[in-house]
Image (cartoon, rainbow, N blue to C red):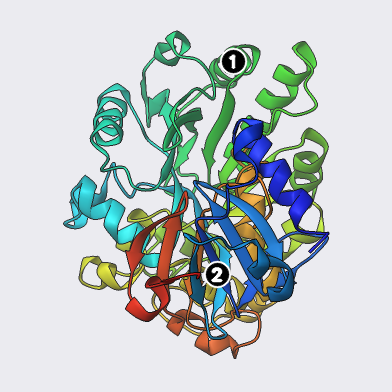
């Protein structure tokens, strides 16, 4: 108990509770008798976790955490089920484009929560969509956390510096914040490009100088060359050790570009379901025909090269392109994405080729893409992405442990509960979500 109580007291300070409330402030809920995958380097697995208000206050063994319970603490026996940090979808369009597949904003939020996402990065939030998100937030309908990326172009249409009137990384609430600006560099596997080098250099330089993280859609190696040049120039003119500019997709990648990404501190934001089928993606088919498969979807090479790599679904776009509208409602799960990273199977279920199998990740590596590394991708690793005292109580309760089941069983793991800020926002198992007061 000595190890846990100081953590509890320290978190009370984080919560800004006055000293005279420290003694009676027992946890609101304790989840115990489970497998707690913390995603922390120091202690990777525990049995119990305690939550006070919207924060985690203790993680440890049952014998250490259970004594913290007070008379009003809800105690939930997990009966061996698994608790993990809530999953973070680093590149998606759940809310903005969800209506294309029948998800209006509230339904899109609910769909994401059912799958275990507690945070999503919306990658196209223009002024109109930002206003809509703020209204959802004010009404209480934004039941998960959203990072908004503000577009400066869409294909050849340029929107100017409209975002400069806003504050970078501003938090409107714990559920909505501005994360960065979004640029589209190419289209259809590099068959179309949207910027001259001079234009791109100027846009990246202005955003960087004003403190904005830049998130750039770059599928092809040619587009990535443009972006690397622009970022290098921006960093040379305004040095930063922690800019964390991002490459979205990074599907086609040469060795020299991989090394340059590491040198510049760029983040690779990938979708493990890519690429899918060359018959559905003509640009991809041309690369395969030219024998350039060694450049494509190098997920293992990115991770092994210490390029910070984060994972996402691109929901609903990737599913629409690769799987078709009729199958969309079955997809978008983080555990499906983990399975794709580990097996390299696409949404179509096509058997992966040898060049894809060489780029498989381990389950542990894949889980990091959607938890602690994803939190780094939005400058939030201090409050998200792992289960540790002081962090948001964003977590999921799973039917099985993804690190111990057979690989083929990963997509079948059920999300029994999704908790955001200590509040159960999705419950698929009343036994897990119900609780008893500690007497």
Q: Position of residue 224 (x, y in %)?
A: 62, 39
Left or right of 266, for residue 320: left
Q: Using the rendered view, name the quadrant where residue 288 is placed.
A: bottom right
Q: Which residue is located at x 30 percent, y 52 percent?
A: 109
* Above or below for 215 versus 349: above
The circle on residue 39 is none
* Above or below for 165 versus 171: above
Q: Which residue is located at x 54 percent, y 81 percent?
A: 81
Secondary structure at numbered mark 1: helix
Q: Using the rendered view, name the quadrant where residue 205 is placed.
A: top right
Q: Which mark sits nearer the N-terminus, 1 or 2? A: 2
The circle on residue 198 is 1
Q: Which residue is mark 2?
A: 31
Q: Which residue is located at x 66 percent, y 61 percent?
A: 368
Q: Position of residue 228 (x, y in %)?
A: 69, 32
Q: Position of residue 49 (x, y in %)?
A: 62, 64
> Residue 432 or 23: which is nearer the viewer?
23
Q: Using the rendered view, name the quadrant where residue 153 is placed.
A: top left
10 Å crowding of disc 1: few (<14), some (14-19), many (20+): few
Left or right of 258, for residue 423: left
* Above or below for 136 versus 170: below
* Above or below for 4 versus 133: below
Q: Position of residue 302 (x, y in %)?
A: 73, 56
Q: Is residue 293 visible?
A: no
Mark 1 to mark 2 CA distance (whole Å): 55 Å
Q: Which residue is located at x 38 percent, y 66 percent?
A: 115
Q: Quadrant of the N terminus?
A: bottom right
Left or right of 52, for residue 291: right
Mark whose residue sits in front, 1 or 2: 2
Left or right of 428, for residue 213: right
Q: Is residue 376 visible?
A: yes
């Amino acid at each position: 108990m000595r190890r846990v109580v100081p953590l509890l007291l320290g978190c009370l300070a984080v919560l800004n509770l006055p000293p005279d409330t420290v003694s009676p402030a027992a946890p609101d809920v304790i989840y115990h008798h489970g497998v707690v995958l913390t995603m922390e380097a120091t202690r990777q697995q525990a049995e119990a976790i305690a939550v006070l208000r919207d924060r985690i206050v203790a993680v440890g063994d049952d014998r250490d955490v259970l004594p913290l319970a007070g008379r009003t603490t809800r105690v939930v026996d997990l009966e061996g089920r698994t608790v993990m940090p809530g999953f973070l979808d680093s590149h998606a369009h759940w809310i903005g484009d969800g209506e294309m597949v029948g998800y209006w904003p509230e339904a899109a939020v609910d769909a994401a929560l059912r799958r275990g996402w507690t945070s999503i990065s919306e990658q196209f939030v223009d002024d109109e969509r930002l206003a809509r998100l703020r209204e959802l937030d004010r009404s209480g309908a934004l039941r998960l956390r959203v990072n908004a990326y503000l577009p400066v172009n869409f294909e050849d249409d340029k929107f100017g510096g409209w975002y400069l009137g806003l504050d970078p990384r501003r938090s409107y609430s714990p559920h909505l914040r501005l994360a960065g600006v979004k640029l589209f560099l190419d289209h259809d596997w590099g068959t179309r490009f949207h910027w001259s080098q001079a234009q791109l250099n100027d846009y990246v330089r202005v955003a960087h100088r004003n403190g904005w993280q830049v998130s750039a859609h770059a599928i092809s190696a040619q587009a990535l060359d443009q972006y690397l040049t622009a970022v290098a120039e921006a960093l040379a003119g305004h040095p930063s050790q922690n800019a964390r500019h991002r490459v979205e997709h990074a599907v086609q990648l040469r060795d020299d570009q991989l090394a340059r990404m590491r040198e510049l501190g760029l983040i690779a934001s990938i979708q493990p379901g890519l690429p899918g089928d060359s018959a559905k993606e003509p640009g991809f088919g041309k690369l395969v025909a030219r024998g350039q498969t060694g450049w494509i979807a190098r997920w293992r090479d990115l991770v092994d090269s210490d390029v910070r790599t984060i994972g996402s679904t691109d929901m609903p776009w990737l599913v629409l392109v690769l799987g078709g509208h009729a199958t969309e409602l079955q997809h978008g799960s983080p555990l499906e994405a983990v399975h794709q990273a580990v097996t390299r199977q696409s949404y179509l279920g096509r058997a992966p080729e040898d060049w894809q199998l060489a780029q498989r990740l381990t389950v542990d590596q894949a889980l990091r893409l959607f938890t602690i590394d994803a939190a780094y991708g939005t400058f939030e690793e201090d409050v998200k992405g792992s289960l540790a005292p002081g962090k948001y109580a964003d977590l999921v309760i799973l039917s099985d442990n993804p690190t111990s089941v057979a690989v083929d069983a990963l997509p079948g793991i059920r999300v029994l509960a999704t908790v955001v800020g200590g509040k159960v926002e999705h419950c698929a198992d009343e036994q897990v979500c119900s609780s008893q007061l500690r007497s």
